[in-house]
Amino acid sequence: MKLTGKTFVYGIIGYPVKHSLSPLMQTAAFKALGIDAVYVPFEVEPENLGEAVRGLRALNVKGFNVTVPFKENVIEYLDFVDEDAEFLGAVNTVKIEDGKLTGYNTDADGFLKSLIEEGVELKGKKITMFGAGGAARAVGYAVLKGGAKFLNIVNRNFSKGKIVGELLGKRGNVLVFPLREDSVATLLKDTDIIINTTSVGMKPDDPLLFDYSLIPEGITVVDIIYNPAETLLLKAAKEKGCKIVNGLGMLIYQGAIAFEIWTEKKAPVEVMRRVLEEEIYG
């Protein structure tokens, strides 16, 4: 890589941020299209968020991604936010142009694109989604945007689930249920797509999210976890003849949409996919 006075700088802010795969993916994309740019991880202590954002503006950085724990708090330091980011109250991509900072949320459309790529039809479908964190907000918003008929949110912390349910209920038919075996068993009898937005399944010794024998045969099961490639949930679903989708597509497409916002060029999605697969799965 040849750095000159003309090289554009992009990056990601978070705490921690060393684990992020975005530098790998975005650098490969810049290189593939011959764009003179670098992408740098910036680890920012939470109390320094405001200073960091002002510093990125002052240094004429062209754009940056935002990861935990800053997706909500970064909004107060921006000049504009797009519709998705405003609705979700979370920003994961910022473009700096003429000294103005505009925030976007590419998680929802990234998830939507990953399902479209896999041929998953959302229109008129009944969805059961596990989890009520930041990822659940984006995923729930995406499926309603994609035309889902009903969204059932199942969460261990019922009051937290209700908060997300009230937000997403502004966009479609949403019901919230506690994570209990009887309620899960009833819901899954009439579900077209199961989505896991929790971190359950990342570690081999994680407990089961629910009784996987309750998964109906032949439906679609999505897990936003991408490492491992097949969680216990996806393995159980596969044995039931279900279509399974992991979270790699969401990771790729949220990054690809960010790339397109910054550069106004079509992202080299296959290049981004290849470097991530090599890094994650070897």
Image: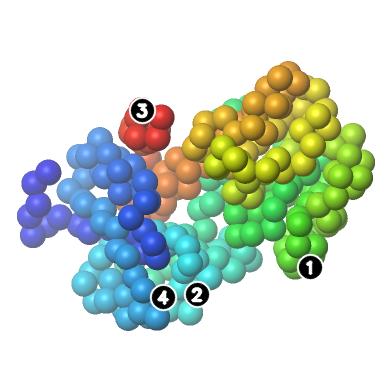
Type of the residue with mark 4: Pro
Comparing labels 3 and 2, the label whose residue is closer to the camera? 3
Task: Decide if residue 41 is on the left or right side of residue 35.
Answer: right
Task: Decide if residue 225 is on the left or right side of residue 172.
Answer: left
Q: Is residue 23 depicted above or below 68 in this figure?
A: above
Q: Earlier in the sequence, mark 2 or mark 4?
A: 4
State how far apart marks 1 and 4 are (Cα): 26 Å
Callout 3: SS = loop
Question: How far from the left and from the top, in percent, is residue 263?
Answer: 32, 51
Callout 1: SS = helix
Q: Is residue 204 visible?
A: yes
Could you tell me which residue is drawn at 30 percent across and 43 percent down? 24
Comparing labels 2 and 4, the label whose residue is closer to the camera? 4
Give the labeled residue for mark 1. Answer: 159
Could you tell me which residue is drawn at 62 percent across and 43 percent down? 206
Estimate how packed mark 4 is, as few (under 14), some (14 to 19) or many (20 or more) residues with alpha carbons within 10 Å: some
Q: Earlier in the sequence, mark 1 or mark 4?
A: 4
Nearer to us in this view, 249 or 100: 249
Callout 4: SS = helix
Tell me the tag on residue 282.
3
Give the labeled residue for mark 4. Answer: 46
Q: Earlier in the sequence, mark 2 or mark 1?
A: 2
Question: How far from the left and from the top, in percent, is residue 170?
Answer: 77, 63
Tell me the tag on residue 78.
none
Give the labeled residue for mark 2. Answer: 73
Type of the residue with mark 1: Ser
Q: Is residue 260 visible?
A: no
> Pointers 4 and 3 in contact (CB under 8 A)?
no
> Pointers 3 and 2 in contact (CB under 8 A)?
no
Estimate how packed mark 1 is, as few (under 14), some (14 to 19) or many (20 or more) residues with alpha carbons within 10 Å: some
